[in-house]
Image: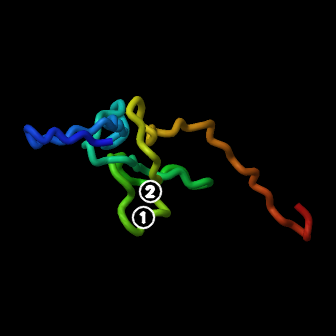
Amino acid sequence: GECINAEYGAVYRSEATIKCVQGDGSAAATDCSAEATECSGPKFVEYTGMTAGTYKCGPCADGTEATCEKCTGAADTGCNAVKEKGVDFKCMDWENKDDKF
């Protein structure tokens, strides 16, 4: 909510500033501007991995839904934290000979 002090013409906001991971994702989440309500960053795509992109305060740019993921910000932690990598997996290399695998 907002509280307006008529004597000084000041507006006070009670919402907490959110934190987002920013830049290349190597640093801890930091405070965003008071207007920010969302964080965004690279998106994990199955069988491909992480898309290229920057972690930031604010929503994804228009038309980047396939490569950017957004989340609702929080005051205590960055919702767009870098995702931990799991163990790489490899598919078997099967060959079809004489209609048999």
Q: Secondary structure at mark 2?
A: strand
- Kind of residue at badge 2: Cys
Please report the residue visible at 39 percent of the width from the left and 58 percent of the height from the top: 60
The picture quadrant where one finds residue 76 is: top left
Q: Nearer the viewer, residue 13 or 29?
A: 13
Q: Where 62 falls versus 55 (above or below)?
A: below
Find residue 77 and name its label: none
* Residue that carries the numbered disc 2 in the rendered image: 68
Circle count: 2
Q: Nearer the viewer, residue 22 or 45?
A: 22
Is 82 situated left or right of 6 in this image? right
Tell me residue 20's x, y (percent): 36, 39
**Within-10-Å neighbours for mark 2: few <14, some 14–19, many 20+:** many
Q: Secondary structure at mark 1?
A: loop
Is 10 situated left or right of 87 in this image? left
Q: Where 96 falls versus 40 (above or below)?
A: below
The quarter of the image holding the C terminus is bottom right
Please report the residue visible at 42 percent of the width from the left and 32 percent of the height from the top: 77
The picture quadrant where one finds residue 80 is: top left
Tell me residue 28's x, y (percent): 35, 30
Please report the residue visible at 24 percent of the width from the left and 39 percent of the height from the top: 3
Asked if the residue under mark 1 is in contact with the one under mark 2, i.e. CB atoms within 8 Å, the reply is yes
Please report the residue visible at 22 percent of the width from the left and 38 percent of the height from the top: 12
Find residue 64 and name its label: 1
- Kind of residue at badge 1: Thr
Tell me residue 96's x, y (percent): 84, 65
